[in-house]
Amino acid sequence: MNNEEMIESRKELAEILRKRQQNLTRSEILKATQPMAKKGFTKAERIKAYSEELEALSDDEIIMSYVTCSRCGEKFCSLEEVDEILKDGCKDFDEFMRKVLERSPTHH
Ligand SMILES: [Zn+2]
């Protein structure tokens, strides 16, 4: 196994997650900000708010947003467990999420 490929820290993981969020398409961002439309925000305002919110999140906050169920708000794992998963070895986002979900096998 090539160690160079491994995600070594929460900070590094957070950067990977941020990049993913920044690469969402316009329609994905609009879907994510749908509740704002009901409050009268324009599409441009929603897209702006989305990127501002993303920049304001700390590394740990963005990590926790990925390990929290968007349907029920349950956390799949703690930050300590994120550290364990990284220690165990992850080379990319998909592997990280697979290991997170393995810890919560009965989740809907
Ligand atoms: Zn859930």
Image (cartoon, helix red, strand yellow):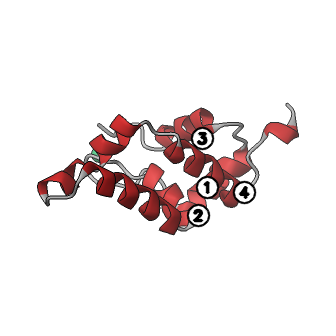
Residue kind at label 2, given as amino acid type: Asp
Q: Which residue type does callout 1 highlight? A: Ala
Which residue does the image show at 31% across and 57% down from the upper left?
45
Q: Earlier in the sequence, mark 1 or mark 2?
A: 1
N-term mark: 1 or 4: 4
Say what secondary structure mark 1 lies in: helix
**Mark 2–mark 3 contact, CB under 8 Å?**
no
Which residue is identified by label 2?
A: 59
Does the beta carbon of the residue at mark 1 sit less than 8 Å from ligand 1? no
Q: Which residue is mark 4?
A: 9
**Residue pointed to by mark 1:** 14
- Percent coordinates x, y for residue 80 in the rendering: 59, 62
Distance from the alpha carbon under mark 3 to that under mark 4:
12 Å
* Mark 3 or 1, closer to the camera: 1
Instruction: Give how far apart the Cα atoms at labels 3 and 1 are.
Output: 12 Å
Amino acid type of the residue tagged 4 in the rendering: Ser
Instruction: Kindly identify which residue carries mark 3.
Output: 96
Q: Secondary structure at mark 4?
A: loop
Q: Is residue 24 visible?
A: yes
Quadrant where the C terminus sits is top left
Q: Secondary structure at mark 2?
A: helix
